[in-house]
Image (cartoon, helix red, strand yellow):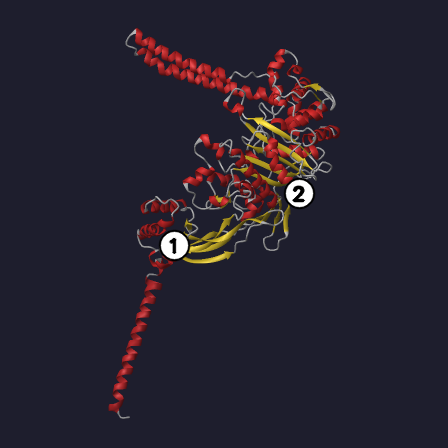
Amino acid sequence: MDDRERKPYTYRIWGLSAVVVLIFLILSFNLWRLQIAQGSYYSAMAKGNVMKLVKVPPTRGDIVDRNGKLLVTSVPEFVVHLNWMDLQQAKGNAWKDVVQRLAFYVQPEWPNANQTVESIAEDIFANIQNHQWERYRPVIILDEISPELQAVIAEHQEELPGVSVDAIPVRSYPETNLLGQLLGYVREISDAEITQLNKNTDAQEAGFEYAQGDLVGKMGVEKSYDFWLRGKEGVQQVEVDNNARPVSKQLIQAAEAGKTVQLTLDADLQKTVDDTLDQVILDIQKKNPAAHAGAAVVMDVNTGKILAMTSRPAMDPNDLIGIISEQMADKYWPQDPKRASEAASLNRALTGLYPPGSTFKMVTAMSALQLKQTTPYEQIDDRLTSLGSLGAQQQGIAEWGGNYFGLVNLYRAMAKSSNIYFEIMGRRVFDSNPEMIGQIAREFGLGIESGIDLPGEAKGISPSAEWKKSYFTNINENALKSRDEALAKIESDYAPKLEQATDETNRQLVQKEKDTEIKKINDLYKLRTLEPLEWQGYDSYNNSIGQGYNAYTPLQLANYVATMVNGGKHYRPFVVEKLLDPITGETVQQFEPKVLNTVSVSPEVLDQVKQAMRAVTTGEGTANWLFADVPEFTGGGKTGTAQIGSKDTISGEIYNGVFVAFAPYDNPQIAFAGVVEFGGHGGETAGYVAKAAFMEYFGWKNTNGG
C-alpha cells in the first residue's frame, strides 16, 4: 500500500487517539474534582449518613384449645402500606400530592363511606404524623383491600411513590365469637400500656422493652400472654443520608414467631354452653325484650382449670381488627351510660358482679354447722313468726312465692330453698360471730380476686359487720364533704343576689329560692346517710339468703362450688395449660394447678352441705325435674332467683336466674355456675345451660336420645 492509500487510515488513527486522550482528560479532571477539589464536601456528605436499626415485627403465635383446635392465628392479608422513607423521595411538597391521590383511590373502600377525599387525606396525614417517632417502618393506611383496589394501585404505581400493596400477617379468629372476650384482640399499644407492659416480669427477664408502634393484646389471653405470643422481633439496618432519605437496607436478624398458647378450655364444650345460653336468652326475650345478657363458667374441681367461659352479648374479635367504624365501637363500648350494660366487650363471667341469690345459702349452712349453731336434722317451722319478735319479723323476708314448707331441716330447706330457715341460721351465726359468714365466703373464693391469668377480674363484695361500717363511713364522709361544698356554693351564689335585691319583696323571693336549694342539698345528704353504720337484723336476713350487699362473679361462684365438693381445696383458676414451640410443638412451659388455701370448714360439714345440694336435684328439690330425663346424672346443684334491686323499687321486681351445680356426686369432676340476666328462676334458665354442659362433657344422653 503506497503513502496515498495509507494517508486516510493515518488520519483516522490520529483522530481516534485524540478522542481517547480527550476522554481520559475529562475523566481525570472529574476524578480530581471529586476527590481533591470537592473531596471535603463529599466526605462530609458521607459522614452525614446514619445507620438506623428498625424492628421487623414477628408473626404472632397461635392460640389453641386443650385438644389442639385452632382458635386464633395470623393469616396473610393484603393492606395498603405507605412507606415514609420512600415517600420522602418525592421532591419538595410533592409527597402531599401523593397522599391526595392515594385518598382518591382508596375512597371506595374507606370504612366511613361518608368521608370526602380531602377528609380521608387528612386522616392519612394524621396517621403519618402519629408515626413520626419511627419514620422507617411502613404505615398501614387500609387493610382487607379488595383485588380491585390492588389492581388500581398497581396501575398507578408510578404516581404513588412509597405506596405499596403488601401481604402482612393479621390476627384472625376463625371461630368468630367463640370465647371472644376471653381471647381478646390486638391493636397498637398506647402510651399508658407501654409503662404497664414493661413491668411484665417475663419481658424484664428477657430484656425486652415495649415501644410505640408495637401491636399488643388489649384484653383476655392476648393481653395476659402478650409477651409469649408476640415472638422475637427481627432487626433491619437502614442507612439514611443527611436529608433522612434511605440509601440502603440490610436484614441483620430475622424475626422469630411467637409461642403457641394452649388453653385449658374445650372448644366443643364451649360451643355447647354458648349455643344453649343463646337459646335461653332468646326464649326469655319473648316475654322480656330487655333480656340480652348472661354468663356461665365450667371448671375442673380438682385443678382449677377453666373448661368453658361464656359471656353474652357475644364478642367477635375480628370486628376489632384495623379501622373500627363508629357503629362497631358503639356495639362494644356504648357511649350512652344507660347502655353501658349492653357492652359486648364486657366479659360478664369475669367482671360481671351479680347478687348470688339462694346459691349463697350453702355458705350460711356451712357457717351455722361449723359454729355448731344447728345440726343437719334440726327442724324449723317455715313461718315468719319463727324469726322471733315482731320487730325481727318486720325486718325479715317472707317465704318466696308465698309458700309454706312446714317443718324443714337442712336437707329439706336446701331442697325447697327455704328463706325462713336460712334467715334464722344467718341470724344465729351473726349473733355468735359477726364475721363468720364473710370469712367462710372468702375462704371459698367469694368477694376476693382469684388470681386467674386473665386481666380485668372484679373483686366483688362479701359483706360483714366490719365491711359495712367501713363502707358506709366512707360514704358518709364523702356525702358530708359534698354537702358542705354545695352549701358553700349556694352561699357564694346568693350573697350578691340578696345584696342587689331592689326591695324587701324581691329580697324575700331570692331568699325563698336560696332556702329551696339548701333544702334539696340537705334532703340529698339525709338520703345518702340514711343507712346506719351498724349491722342490723335485716342485714343478717338479707345476707343469709344471698341478697343485700352480696355481689360475685360467675367465676367466683363456680370456684366456690368446686371448693365445696373437692374436699375444701381452693384452687387458683387458670385458662392457659402450656406454651408450645411453634416449630417443634414441644412444651416450652407447663402451668400447674395451685392451691390458694384449704378451708377451715370440716370435711363432715362439707359432706353434709354436699348432700343438701343433691337434694335440690332430686326428690322435692327445686331442680328435681331438670335432670329427670338424664339417667346417668349424679351430682347436686342450687337454684337462685336473685332480686336485682331493693324492695319497692323498679328493679325490685326484676330477677336474675342463677344456678350452680357439680357432677358426678361420688367423685366430682366439674363445677358449673351461670347467670341469666332477667332470667327469673335459675333452674329454668341457667339450669338448662348446666344440663347441656354436663351432657356434653360426660357424653350423657337423655331418655329421648338427645
Q: To which residue does mark 2 refer? A: 701
- Between the residue at mark 1 and the residue at mark 2, the CA separation in whole angstroms equals 53 Å
* Quarter placement of the C terminus: top right
Location of residue 584 in the rendering, given as x and y in whole percent from the top left corner: 61, 55
Asked if 277 appears above or below 71 in the picture, the reply is: above
Residue type at mark 1 is Leu
Residue 149's disc number: 1
Going by the numbered disc 2, the residue's amino acid type is: Lys
Q: Is residue 618 above or below residue 108?
A: above
Quadrant where the image shows the N terminus:
bottom left
Q: Measured from the top left, where is residue 184 in percent x and y? A: 53, 42
Q: Are marks 1 and 2 in contact (CB under 8 Å)?
A: no
For the residue pair 202 and 387, the one nearer the viewer reads as 387
Is any atom of residue 584 visible in this view? yes
Residue at 52 percent of width and 16 percent of height: 530
Drawn side of residue 214 relative to residue 613, left or right: left
SS class, disc 2:
loop
Is disc 1 surrounded by few (<14), some (14 to 19) or many (20+) residues within 10 Å?
some
**Which residue of the protein is positioned furthest toward the top in this rendering?**
504
Q: Quadrant of residue 439?
A: top right
Residue 595 placement, left or right of 523: right
Q: Nearer the viewer, mark 1 or mark 2?
A: 2
Classify mark 1: helix, strand or loop: helix
Work out whether 519 lies above or below 255. above
- How many numbered marks have been drawn onto this rendered protein structure? 2
Earlier residue among tags 1 and 2: 1
For the residue pair 295 and 627, the one nearer the viewer reads as 627
Residue 451 is at least partly visible in this image: no
